[in-house]
Image (cartoon, rainbow, N blue to C red):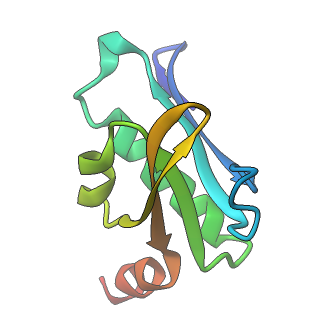
């Protein structure tokens, strides 16, 4: 969760098997949301970075997500396209983030 004072302004979740059409992809970043008044301030990116850090704690090596229209934001955070597909009646892009390389980069800083 992201807060502005005591007001919640954003959230992100870690999930198991987010897409029933891709059950072989186990660990997902999902429900990333920032209230419209607080967008374009880096809050979404901070939520994603924090979720990735939390995913590393149990030793996960990769995460997936799907997005309808935020491909550029995730690409800036080093998420890579996997597949374009239809899901829940809309065109989505599935993306993958290697957490092992993230861990190595953090350790070298």
Image height check: is 48 above or below 95? above
| Residue at x-position 67% and y-position 75% | 60
The image quarter in which residue 107 lies:
bottom left
The image quarter in which residue 59 lies:
bottom right
Q: Quadrant of the C terminus?
A: bottom left
Q: Is residue 94 left or right of residue 17?
A: left
Image height check: is 66 above or below 7? below
Q: In which quarter of the image is the N terminus?
A: top right
Residue 50, image x, y percentages = 50, 52
Of residue 91 and residue 47, the one placed in the foreground of this image is 91
Residue 106, image x, y percentages = 39, 78
Q: How many labels does the image show?
A: 0
| Residue at x-position 44% and y-position 40% | 91
The image quarter in which residue 12 lies:
top right
Image height check: is 37 above or below 105? above
| Residue at x-position 33% and y-position 40% | 70
| Residue at x-position 35% and y-position 45% | 45
Residue 20, image x, y percentages = 76, 50
Residue 76, image x, y percentages = 23, 57
């Amino acid at each position: 969760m992201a807060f502005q004072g005591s007001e919640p302004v954003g959230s992100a979740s870690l999930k198991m098997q987010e897409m029933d059409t891709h059950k072989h992809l186990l660990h997902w970043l999902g429900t990333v949301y920032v209230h419209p008044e607080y967008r374009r301030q880096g809050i979404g990116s901070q939520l994603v970075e924090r979720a990735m850090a939390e995913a590393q704690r149990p030793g996960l090596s990769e995460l997936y997500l799907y997005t309808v229209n935020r491909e550029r934001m995730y690409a800036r955070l080093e998420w890579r396209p996997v597949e374009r597909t239809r899901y829940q009646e809309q065109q989505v892009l599935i993306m993958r983030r290697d957490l092992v390389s993230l861990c190595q980069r953090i350790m070298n800083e």
